[in-house]
Image (tube, rainbow, N blue to C red):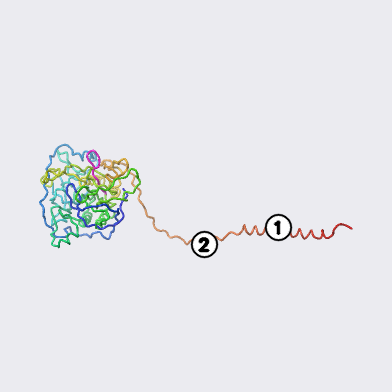
Amino acid sequence: MTPRRQRWIVIAGVTALALTSNAVIGVSPAYAERPVIDPAQLPPPSPPGPLEPTEQKNACALPSEAVDAQEVPTAQETLDFASVWPITRGAGQLVAVIDTGVTSHPRLAGLTSGGDYVSAGDGLFDCDAHGTMVAGLIAAQTAPGSGFAGGAPDARVLSIRQSSNAFQIVDNRPEEEKAAEPENAAGYGNARTMAMAIRTAVDSGATVINISEVACVPAGGGVADGPLGAAVQYAVRERNVVVVAAAGNVGSAACRTQNPMTDPVRPGTDPWASFGTIATPAWFDDVLTVGSVESDGTPSPFSLAGPWVDVAAPGSNMTSLSSTGNGLANGVLGTDGVLPMSGTSFAAPLVAAVAALVRAHRPELSALEVVDRIQRTAHAPAEGWNPLVGHGVVDPLAAVTDLVTPAPRAVLADSVALSAPLPPPAPDHRPRTAAATGSVLVAVVLALGLALSIPLRRRGPPQ
């Protein structure tokens, strides 16, 4: 996994999104930060529901209907999900889609309700035509005469509506108080409700969680995502759930600033040393963060770079299930025509489908081992990792079947009691003693010789 984040910050932004934009808070260059998880901020278990009274202010989005042809859509053909299906189709996996809700569809037979944090619904209504498209990319079933299907067609979907551009808070506060808490001007949803939705998804038995939503904020500006980080850690580390999230889209009203690319002149530079835009929950270490590529494999121009990006998948001009009727859609109708179904929002569910396939075929792997396997089997860029596509475009067949040596885990050894240090050894005086003794002996011998020679000298020569 790429070098990741270790410093807690505060976030108060929303996660509601449009088809080509994942976040709605402005950015500006600032000093780099790293998040740190505070487990004490994990939201307690509670029934799903909005934190404030809400009401629908905008009309529901109208999907642009697409022809359901025999040809396999480009994204699915590129990743070649069909090559994996003889081995596994994701049966037994429950993928939570934390999004704008998922409308019931004949090709989502395993769809179940996870709750609604936007209104008093059950999560099975998609007014934004977004969550249904995301769910279809994960688990839409195959059908005769149709080339479209989700990557893991036998997986089940748990829908949790967490945001909507059509709803707003019933807000009677003074205008100055409203301005102090930046919310999506177009809709409802924030980092706190996302954290609560993750907790609900985990406690409802999800094995994979897909989050095609992101809040962008300026680095150094302060963003209250403490509960969100705690919820991610709870999912991955405590409950063994794979969490997949979109990297975010640059060019929106919020994510104006693209983060810097890798400097080829200084390949060893820490990618966390400088960036201007934070994307949450994408930047948390335990999240499998997904960037977008075009049909030719090049990074999508809208894909937000960052040191937290892990892998990539196709995300442009997608086709999926329609939130109205029984057919397919390729975007939503806007004032200027069709807004295409493009964004990292739609790259992420393809990777969530890969995670479901791996979990179904290799149930012995932990969530972190699944993430490691997906990264190691991706088609890496020349430099091995870069901030746009991470470790590269995912390969579903390789992720399921390849022999992969797990990355070594850091193990903290138990503390060991140490005995008191030994006293320093006594100084060795033997050389000095030997030298002194030798000197004394020499002096004694000389003295004796001198004493014996005196009588002889006193006698003198004979008379």
- Left-right relation of 274 to 452: left
Mark 2 residue type: Pro
Which image quarter: residue 302? top left
Residue bearing mark 2: 423
Q: Nearer the viewer, residue 210 or 183?
A: 183
- Left-right relation of 248 to 338: right
Q: Residue furthest right?
A: 463
Mark 1 residue type: Val
Question: Mark 2 against mark 1, which lies toward the viewer?
Answer: 1
Q: Can residue 291 be found in the magenta stretch?
A: yes
Confirm whether residue 146 shows in the render. yes
Q: Which residues are magenta?
A: 288-299
Q: Can residue 412 be found in the magenta stretch?
A: no
What residue is shown at x 69% (from left), y 60% (from top)? 440
Q: Which mark is residue 442?
A: 1
Q: Nearer the viewer, residue 90 or 170?
A: 170
Confirm whether residue 1 shows in the render. no
Which image quarter: residue 153? top left
Residue 107, position as x, y percentages in the image: 15, 44
Q: CA distance from mark 2 to mark 1?
A: 38 Å
The relative height of residue 454 versus residue 300 in the rendered view (above or below) is below
